[in-house]
Image (cartoon, rainbow, N blue to C red):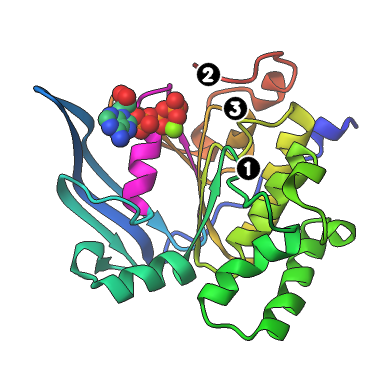
Amino acid sequence: MSEEQTVTAPEPKAPDQPNIVRTRGVKKIYRMGTFDLEALKGVDMEIKRGEYISIMGPSGSGKSTLFNMIGALDKPSEGKVYIDEVDVAQLDAYELAWLRCRKIGYIFQTFNLIPVMTALENVTLPMIFAGIPTDESIDKGVGLLERVGLGGRVQHKPLELSGGQQQRVAVARALANDPAIVLADEPTGNLDRKTGREIIELLRELNEENEVTIISATHDLKMLDVSDRILWVQDGKIERDQKREELDLDVGQLEHDEENTIE
Ligand SMILES: Nc1ncnc2c1ncn2[C@@H]1O[C@H](COP(=O)(O)OP(=O)(O)OP(=O)(O)O)[C@@H](O)[C@H]1O
Ligand SMILES: [Mg+2]
């Protein structure tokens, strides 16, 4: 069996879990001088604790904008975002900082590591912000880097690591404070196929073993066969909400597709 084919479909998750993310009527309007650009046009969705969700959609459809709303990095122009059924708009500055630091881990397409810091320092930084003692954060940071297969690279700076290794550091950093949710915005967008698949596998392991809710925006069709559900975004709206078992795409066939992406 080739390496590409070793990913097996996960068991469907229990449907009776509570919502960890819920949005109602979320709109985002960017004011661009004299005209308004409606990037989100009323998004309603629910994500259960422990789900692995892929958000698929063409470039410019609003995926990153939606991530910024779910991740409490930006505010909707209209509508509500609830995390664990708490309205994010009701949180004060301290509570928002806690949510961003403790509850949510972020992974970006371009890794966003701090170049002058070692892999270990990048991973321990969120723990320092969270007030965890240095010794404890170093032990935990080393453990996380071992977990992502980088036990031998803790003192390397980002530029001394390959793209896939940098993204592994970013995954470890996202897990630093044991988040309930990991938001990954095109985590494989800058990686080759094999390395991309390794990151996808890693996210899936975290989802299954640590029950972390994974929400991943992607163009990458390889993501589909590990997801519990796919939300298809088109022109600022959710066009389709599809369970993995409802997929009519032949994912095995996609493995042989050179492009493996949608535009
Ligand atoms: N800060 C901003 N100011 C103005 N317009 C924006 C801003 N951010 C995004 N947009 C616009 O909103 C729309 C949605 O952008 P968004 O980045 O959410 O798309 P996306 O689905 O993430 O695309 P991609 O797959 O290319 O990352 C686009 O038309 C974009 O030009
Ligand atoms: Mg984007």
Dot 1 crowding, Cα within 10 Å, few <14, some 14–19, many 20+: many
Q: Is residue 132 above or below residue 157?
A: below
Magenta segment, which residues?
A: 51-70
Q: Residue at x 77, y 62 (%)?
A: 145
Q: Amino acid at mark 3?
A: Leu
Residue 238 seen in this snapshot: no
Q: Residue at x 59, y 59 (%)?
A: 174
**Residue 70 in the figure: left or right of residue 25:** right
Q: Residue at x 20, y 62 (%)?
A: 89
* Distance from Cα at disc 1 to Cα at disc 3: 10 Å
Residue 239 numbered tag? none
Residue 262 numbered tag? 2
Q: Is residue 44 above or below residue 256?
A: below
**Residue 200 in the figure: left or right of residue 72:** right
User: Regarding ligand 2, which quadrant of the image does it lie in?
Assistant: top left
Q: Position of residue 10 (x, y in %)?
A: 65, 49
**Residue 74 in the figure: left or right of residue 179:** left
Is ligand 1 within 8 Å of the beta carbon of the residue shown at mark 3?
Answer: no
Q: Position of residue 163 (x, y in %)?
A: 74, 38
Q: Is residue 115 above or below residue 35?
A: below
Read off the residue under disc 1.
226
Q: Amino acid at mark 1?
A: Val
Residue 164 on the magenta span: no
Dot 2 crowding, Cα within 10 Å, few <14, some 14–19, many 20+: few
Q: Position of residue 40 (x, y in %)?
A: 24, 34
Read off the residue under disc 3.
221
Badge 3 vs badge 2, beta-carbon distance below 8 Å: yes
Element assignment for label 1: helix
